[in-house]
Image: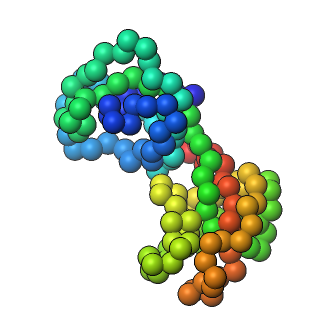
Amino acid sequence: MSLTLVGTRLAETDTSFVYRGEAPACADCPYRKQCLNLEKGVRYTVTDVRDGGQELECAVHDGGVLAVEVERVPFEANVPAKGAFSGSKITLAGPCPHTECPSHALCEPMGADFDREYRIEKTLGDPPHDYCALDRELERVELGPPERR
């Protein structure tokens, strides 16, 4: 679990987000060490909003920021079916230009990195599409958060 600052709109228990890293407006911020302490490209969920926390002004978040506790969380994805079993490590199949496909969000999950290896927490079965326009054999899985770099 990590303590960080997030925009007031995200500061609600069970809200998930992908940390995108430093914005240009963060350069001179006095709170940057408390805010920029997460790993870029990783999905987090707010587990607790600090009681009585002071709303701090922020050049990025128009409503300011609040202190919260977050943890790295697993996410669903489509991965190559070959070798897709619980406990195995795998990389995503790669980008897909077919944005109209019902599986697109699982083939290109928010915050996931195609060059990163993930551990399969559990297999969830067939993807939501009837066929893959790229002729990929895919399995829907839950991937654990990436190992820290």
The residue sitting at 78% across, 69% down in the picture is 83
Is 147 placed left or right of 35 in the picture? right
Q: Is the residue 6 above or below the residue 105 in the image?
A: above
Residue 40 visible in the snapshot: no
Q: Is the residue 131 above or below the residue 104 in the image?
A: below
**Front residue (pair 54, 25):** 54
Q: Quadrant of residue 97?
A: bottom left
x, y (%) of residue 143? Answer: 66, 54
The residue sitting at 80% across, 62% down in the picture is 85
The residue sitting at 23% across, 39% down in the picture is 60
Q: Is the residue 51 above or below the residue 92 in the image?
A: above
**Front residue (pair 90, 60):** 60
Q: How many numbered marks have been drawn onto this rendered protein structure?
A: 0
Q: Is the residue 110 above or below the residue 6 in the image?
A: below
**Front residue (pair 20, 142):** 142
Q: Quadrant of residue 12?
A: top left
x, y (%) of residue 82? Answer: 77, 74
x, y (%) of residue 34? Answer: 37, 25
The residue sitting at 23% across, 32% down in the picture is 63
Residue 149 visible in the snapshot: yes
Name the image quarter holding the C terminus: top right
Q: Quadrant of residue 22?
A: top left
Is 42 placed left or right of 89 in the picture? left
x, y (%) of residue 48? Answer: 50, 24
Is 14 placed left or right of 90 in the picture? left
Name the image quarter holding the N terminus: top right
- Give the color scheme: rainbow, by chain, secondary structure or one colour: rainbow
Taking the view exactly as shown, the residue that stands out farthest to the top is 52
